[in-house]
Image (spheres, rainbow, N blue to C red):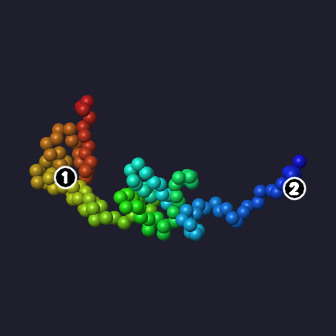
Amino acid sequence: MGESRRGPLKSAVPSNVVSPVRRCSRTACGRPAVATLTYVYADSTAVLGPLATYAEPHCYDLCAQHSERLTAPRGWEVVRLSDGSAPTRPSGDDLEALANAVREAARPQERAAESGKPNGRGGDPMEVGRRGHLRVLRSPDN
């Protein structure tokens, strides 16, 4: 029973023609894919995001080089979605937000020293204590 009309059936042998790694969809490019390109024709938008979990028939897998150089037709918009796994460098806005948070954390102690009120309550009868931007509130039952 191990035969067909064409001869004996061969066992499944791994082939070097088909690779388990998804490759770039661009012609003659054999680099591994890192991003997936999808077109939203109704919005004239090309969406480039992280590599999709499964290969879809109407999506294109692109390597790093082709995804960086991607351009859209005139009148179309390219939306680039980041996957969040890549380490990003802090921007100037991030550093400014951090500096503001540190300044704000130091302010309650300054206000308490100026007003002469213990624990920096600042007139809130529900506030028992404060540490940085966190407040300890009295239970409403008491």
Instruction: Name the side, left or right, on which 84 lies relative to 8.
Output: left
**Residue tagged 1:** 108
Instruction: Name the side, left or right, on which 45 lies relative to 61.
Output: left
**Residue tagged 2:** 7
User: Which label's residue is closer to the chain start, 1 or 2?
Assistant: 2
Instruction: Name the side, left or right, on which 81 lies relative to 54.
Output: left
Q: Horizontal and vertical percent for residue 34?
A: 51, 62
Residue at 89 percent across and 48 percent down: it is: 1
- The image quadrant where one finds the C terminus is top left
Label 1 crowd (10 A; few <14 / some 14-19 / many >=20) = some
Label 2 crowd (10 A; few <14 / some 14-19 / many >=20) = few
Q: Horizontal and vertical percent for residue 81?
A: 41, 57
Identity, as a three-letter code, of the amino acid under mark 2: Gly
Give the distance between the C-alpha atoms of the residues marked 1 and 2, in whole angstroms.
86 Å
Q: Nearer the viewer, residue 112 or 6?
A: 6
* Residue ranking furthest to the top: 141
Residue at 39 percent across and 64 percent down: it is: 88
Q: Nearer the viewer, residue 103 or 110?
A: 103
Which image quarter: residue 19?
bottom right
Q: Nearer the viewer, residue 105 or 80?
A: 80
